[in-house]
């Protein structure tokens, strides 16, 4: 269903922004999309994360909830990872869900 789960999203495409991820940020409700990415870690994180691996069609391959510090997760079939702080109240993905990114006009915000 188009538009069914629209949420604020930040994009991390460079090596520096992907390496940093949500590290050094305070908990917030924004979701981070790391592209390309198939391997993440929670070294240095003080907050738990929700993490989802995404394939080239936008399908959620694997979901991890409430991932604590000092963990490494990877999925060889993933081309992207979506992550957020576990403290977010909004629903999270399930395996098989689809993820899409669409441009938003400033007046739509």
Image (tube, rainbow, N blue to C red):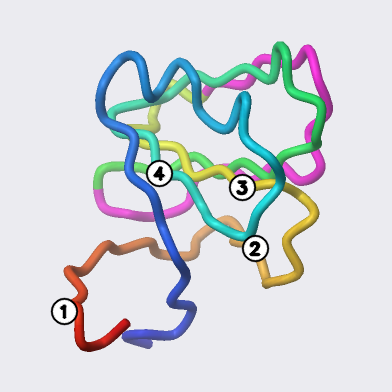
Quarter of the picture holding the C terminus: bottom left
Q: Which residue is mark 1?
A: 105
Quarter of the picture holding the N terminus: bottom left
Residue 26 colored in magenta in the image: no
- Asked if disc 1 and disc 2 are in contact, CB closer than 8 Å, the reply is no
Q: Which residue is mark 3?
A: 84
**N-term mark: 3 or 4:** 4
> Residue 68: horizontal and vertical position, in percent?
83, 28
Q: How far separated are the C-alphas under marks 1 and 2?
A: 25 Å
Residue 62 colored in magenta in the image: yes
Dot 3 lies on which element? strand
Q: How far separated are the C-alphas under marks 3 and 4?
A: 9 Å
**N-term mark: 3 or 1:** 3
**Disc 1: CA contacts within 10 A as few (<14), some (14-19) or many (>=20):** few
Q: Which residue is mark 2?
A: 92
Using residue 12 as the reference point, say whether residue 25 is left or right of it. right
Q: Residue 5, labelled with which disc?
A: none
> Residue 80: horizontal and vertical position, in percent?
37, 36
């Amino acid at each position: 269903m188009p538009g069914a789960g629209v949420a604020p999203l930040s994009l991390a495409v460079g090596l520096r922004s992907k390496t940093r991820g949500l590290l050094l940020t305070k908990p917030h409700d924004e979701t981070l999309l790391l592209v390309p990415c198939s391997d993440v870690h929670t070294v240095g994180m003080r907050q738990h994360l929700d993490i989802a691996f995404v394939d080239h069609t936008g399908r959620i391959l694997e979901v991890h909830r409430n991932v604590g510090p000092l963990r490494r997760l990877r999925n060889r079939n993933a081309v992207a990872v979506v992550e957020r702080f576990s403290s977010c109240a909004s629903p999270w993905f399930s395996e098989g869900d689809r993820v899409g990114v669409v441009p938003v006009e400033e007046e739509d915000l």
